[in-house]
Amino acid sequence: MSDCLFCKIANHEIKSYKVYETKEFLAFMDIFPPTFNGKITMPTVLVIPKKHYGSNAFEDVPEKVYLKSFKVARKVAKAMQRALKPMRVCLMIEGTEINHFHIKLYAIYKEFYPNYLSSMKGPNNEATQASNKWLRETAKKIKEAMKELRKEKEL
């Protein structure tokens, strides 16, 4: 895709700080990792297929590519663990800003980062648990879709 930033990086049209590369995949440093007070808090590596697939991971990405992406991410995460010595390396699939399937690997050094929105704490370190009603209704919708997909032989 000609206007895709990650395609340009994969094609070596834009400089990147590569950590791993094969014929099909590229892993490189995120030039905008999470920061706090001007300091990098979580070194981040992006793992992408070189071929363009949109960010809708379950519709745009063929299953074979999806599975291979995780194998590459695991290799890179092991190297990050050894090289950077974090508490752990976390994984996230994202695509909110760049519509090219990618996995983000974060080197985590502590349990909580100020001003970093997580599933347990908001930007002001407040608890942000969803209501039981919302959880029940959303789970019901997903379970109904699961039944439909099984009937259609999509699962």
Image: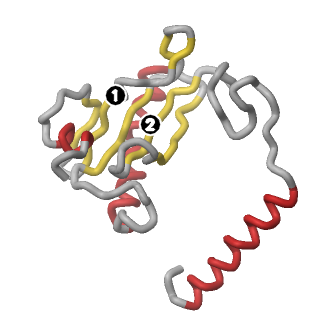
129 vs 30: above or below: below
Q: How many marks?
A: 2
68 vs 151: above or below: above
Instruction: Report the amino acid beneath label 1.
Output: Met
8 vs 65: above or below: above
Most distant residue in the right direction: 132
Judged from the image, the secondary structure of the residue bearing numbered disc 1 is strand
Bin the neighbour count of mark 1 within 10 Å (Cα to Cα): few under 14, some 14-19, many 20 and up.
some
Mark nearest the camera among 2 and 1 is: 1
Q: Report the residue at 42% width, 52% height from top.
A: 70
Bin the neighbour count of mark 2 within 10 Å (Cα to Cα): few under 14, some 14-19, many 20 and up.
many
- Separation (CA) of disc 2 from disc 1: 12 Å
Q: Report the residue at 46% width, 36% height from top.
A: 105
Q: Report the residue at 79% width, 67% height from top.
A: 137
Instruction: Locate residue 17: give its quadrant.
Output: top left
Measured from the top left, where is residue 89 in percent x and y?
A: 53, 33
| Residue on which disc 1 sits | 29
Measured from the top left, where is residue 142 in percent x and y?
A: 67, 71
Measured from the top left, where is residue 132 in percent x and y?
A: 87, 57
| Residue on which disc 2 sits | 77
> Observer-nearest residue: 22 or 92?
92
Measured from the top left, where is residue 77 in percent x and y?
A: 44, 36
> Observer-nearest residue: 133 or 86?
133
Q: Are marks 2 and 1 in contact (CB under 8 Å)?
A: no
Instruction: Report the amino acid beneath label 2.
Output: Ala
